[in-house]
Amino acid sequence: MISTLHSRRSGADGDPAPRLAYGADYNPEQWPRDVWEEDVRLMREAGVTVVSVGIFSWARLQPGPDTWDFGWLDEVMDLLHAGGIGVDLATATASPPPWLTTAHPEILPVTANGETLWPGARQHWRPTSPVFREHALRLVREIATRYRDHPALVAWHVNNELGCHNVYDHSDDAARAFRGWLRARHGSLDALNHAWGTAFWSQRYTDWEQILPPRLAASHPNPTQQLDFKRFSSDALKDHLRAEREILREITPDVPVTTNFMVMGGTRGMNYPDWADEIDFVSNDHYVHPGPQDRDELSFSASLTSGIAGGRPWFLMEHSTSAVNWQPVNVAKRPGDLARDALLHVAHGADAVCFFQWRQSAAGAEKYHSAMVPHAGADSDLFRAVAALGATLKTLAPVAGSEREPAPVGILYDWESWWASEQDSHPTSLLDYRQEALDWYSALLALGVRADLVTSRADLSRHRVLIAPVLHVVPAELAKELTRYAEQGGHLVTTYFSGIVDENDHVWLGGYPGALRELLGIRIEEFGPLLPGESVELDDTATGTLWTDRITLADPDTQVLAHYRTGVHAGRPAVTRRPTGGGSASYVSTRLGVDGLAALLPRLLEPAGVHGELPADVRGKVELTVRRAAGARFLFLVNRTDDTVEVSGPAGDVLVGTGTGTGTAAGGVVLGPREVAVLRQPAG
Ligand code: GAL
């Protein structure tokens, strides 16, 4: 679907062949009219095929409650169409205009502390405000009706990064909606009182009206109330997404609808696996956070986005050509980074590569954020790199529409466990769910073993090994599914603080790891979290931090893969495995970090017969991903290092190489620093 967006309405160039889309957010309202002509000319020069327009245009499109100004947008749409560029048209509801917030301050979000988030930035609206909803939907209807037949329109872009700044609203509107959501989830007050464990601290509710969002409280708010509020807040935004989508589908049933997710860094408020079915294709925004694992994190996020999209192609709606403006220090990308970052997303299933934004702003909060056309103008290394990437993407057209080929290893990423495991009043406040999952991914990258991030909605049996780090929330059904997986030959690996609670955050009694105790064949009576700076040694030379467990073997078949050598549990098991018919279930009781996991993983992968697919000398230096289509496999080889690497082995035509260093050597591929090559093999 994404690969033909440019031709939906047959643009001026009318090329119906599938290809990878290329473009950016385009904000022409920030520029005088004569710049627009130059924009379209430069877009064509850069190979741009699609732009997202109108994301923050509400104040411009609707200057007052009953006044509309579409003339400028008509002209922009016509110009883009004449240039053969498709438009992913925004519903423009992301940032309400001053006239609306002045007339209706009751649409503004309220923090847990009772502070109002005032206008002056963006996204200052309550997802549950009926007043906001009414105004937003009116705008959506106006825009959809006006542009329903415009030939440039290729897709709808609902709002923008729903929940980026307003996911947790504690207002009275939110309280009302939360009560309605709780009634639907729990059915009765008795059921809610049970689920929330309100026998504790005298919290029993006798009327729905007594229930509030978890506002600033005297001590730790009820944990299940917090967990339900997280679920509710994600659902409230999803409800807004649906409301906009319904209008778009009514008016333009043939135009696909998307909204841009933020699968990156610490963004956890929106349960995206649960949103994916609401849209016609998944879109994601990703920004690199400089640091030792920065490109691992990019690969991890791209793989997770692919998992959310069910392995189907997805749309990279935003990333940056170079620096951003919102980090403490905003580092420019190095030569080669722009293309490598973009193609790493493509390697993981992106069929579109777009940036924030087309032309770097001269004013406003994001004026130091990079763009496709920088402040220096088109006569710049950056614009030349942008145009080169456009040409590369054109060459990669055969990849468009291909899906990800399942990797031998799956890493289960579970939003509920993410939310619940990091709540307060736990054995440690230092647990970082995403970091633990990322460390496993980094360790697999270091070993050159392909791994896919998957969600709990995926078919887990596609992976010979399933790693489920900190799988904290395990409802009875999931425990059964994992048991089936291991009994039918799968190799499950899980870690500390897994299997501990059910969907209501109630502890599974009888010893940890609760719901997974029998499957893992171990029993733990008490957790042993470590203080900051404290560590323990294992007898295989690894070092553990954050957590330990006092493990007793509870099944005669359970084997010990490593013991603690130091600490209070010295001599006791640290890593275990229980064979289960054709498969196994392993448990890692401490935090080993990337190096420790890379040292342990070969032993965990060995019974599944999983190892690196590239030659041993380049494992860890080159990331391999595979996309496949009917008749072809596409191998993406991404040089993770700053050195030249020669990969002998993989056969196939070199479809594309991003740098001058890329070329075929005898029986292989040479990748210059940070370069990428894409090989095509016949499938089968
Ligand atoms: C995104 C947002 C864009 C822009 C970008 C800057 O969160 O959708 O509008 O602000 O970040 O990195």
Image (spheres, grey):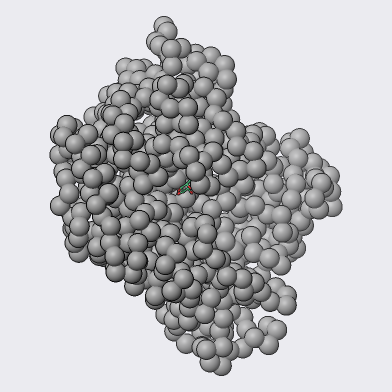
| Residue 68 is at least partly visible in this image | yes
Q: Quadrant of residue 505?
A: bottom right
**Residue 508 position by quadrant:** bottom right
Where does the N terminus fall, quadrant-wise?
top left
Q: Is residue 241 above or below residue 350?
A: below
Q: Is residue 316 visible?
A: no
Considering depth in this image, is 75 or 352 the residue closer to the camera?
75
Residue shown at the point (53%, 47%) measured from the top left: 365
As drawn, which residue projects farthest toward the top?
666
Which residue is located at x 40 percent, y 53 percent?
A: 56
Place of residue 234 in the rendered image (x, y in percent of width and height, measured from the top left): 47, 65
Nearer-the-camera pick, 621 or 662: 662
Q: Residue at x 41, y 69 (%)?
A: 100
> Looking at the figure, which quarter contains the C terminus?
top left
In the rendering, at what x and y percent does residue 554 appear? 67, 58
Numbered circles on residues, count = 0
Q: Is residue 543 left or right of residue 345?
A: right
Q: Is residue 191 above or below residue 139?
A: below
Q: Is residue 505 left or right of residue 104?
A: right
- Identify whether 132 is placed above or below 389: below
Instruction: Look at the picture and state if 473 lies above or below 212.
Output: above
Residue 70 in the image: x percent, y percent?
Answer: 26, 55
Query: Measured from the top left, where is residue 24 in percent x and y?
Result: 37, 39
With 599 as the anchor, is 229 left or right in this view? Answer: left
* Residue in view at x 16 percent, y 45 percent: 151
Residue 261 lies left or right of residue 199; in this view the side is left
Q: Residue furthest bottom?
A: 206
